[in-house]
Image (cartoon, helix red, strand yellow):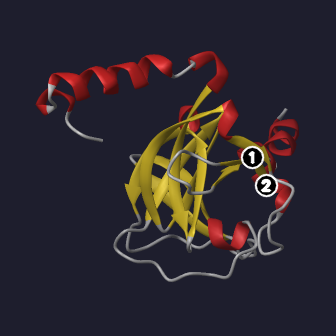
Amino acid sequence: MADVQNLDPVKKQEVNQDFRDIDMEALGEEHINLVFKLGNENFGVDVNMVREIVRVPSFITRVPNAPAYIRGVINLRGTIVPVFDMHLKIGMAGHPLTDEARIVVIAVNEVTFGMIVNSVREVLTIYDSQLEVATKLSSAIDRRYVLWVAKPADDRLILLLDVSNLFELDQILEDSE
């Protein structure tokens, strides 16, 4: 967007009018999401679940007999955190780690875990009016893990993940009681 301060007065008035014309109620409720890449796709999770983002350490301790999508565990400042390979968890082909790869540490209720992603892109506000039901997804991604497909103004598609369903957190919480 152009720098409003450097516009001539007539153009500045037009830009200000454009902002006033946006009907915020029509946009609906806002949802703030952390957007990250897996392969060539953009995914998002509710930013309120994100505790931190860390570099992938050179060594992740494997867990014997764990499913393939569980990369292992890491020691994060004295807390043992299970780490999941998101490619494998959602049904995509595995992907080699690069320098941009990160672990997104998520906390839901009392459960904390890490998700390996190709890169973290941004924190983005998405409005209800930009959301569509995730019924037309390709078969490469398990649909039960996707809550919504977001279509922000820049014409990207962002798949918003259902973290509780993805990691079966309801089952984990029931088992721990």
Query: According to the image, label 1 marks what residue?
Result: 162
> What x and y, as percent, mark residue 95?
56, 81
Most extreme residue toward the front, as rendered? 10
The answer to which image quadrant residue 19 occupies is top left
**Type of amino acid under label 1:** Asp
Q: Is residue 62 above or below residue 44?
A: below
> What x and y, as percent, mark residue 155?
56, 55
> What x and y, as percent, mark residue 166?
77, 53
Give the side of residue 122 with respect to residue 23, left or right.
left
The answer to whether residue 110 of the structure is visible from this angle is no
The reply to whether dot 1 and dot 2 touch (C-beta < 8 Å) is: yes
Q: Residue at x 69, y 73 (%)?
A: 88
Quarter occupied by the N terminus: top left
Q: Residue at x 52, y 64 (%)?
A: 37
Of residues 38 and 56, the one drawn nearer to the viewer in this rendering: 38
Mark 1 / mark 2, whichever is N-terminal:
2
Query: According to the image, label 2 marks what residue?
Result: 145
Q: Residue at x 28, y 20 (%)?
A: 13
Q: Is residue 53 above or below residue 140?
A: above
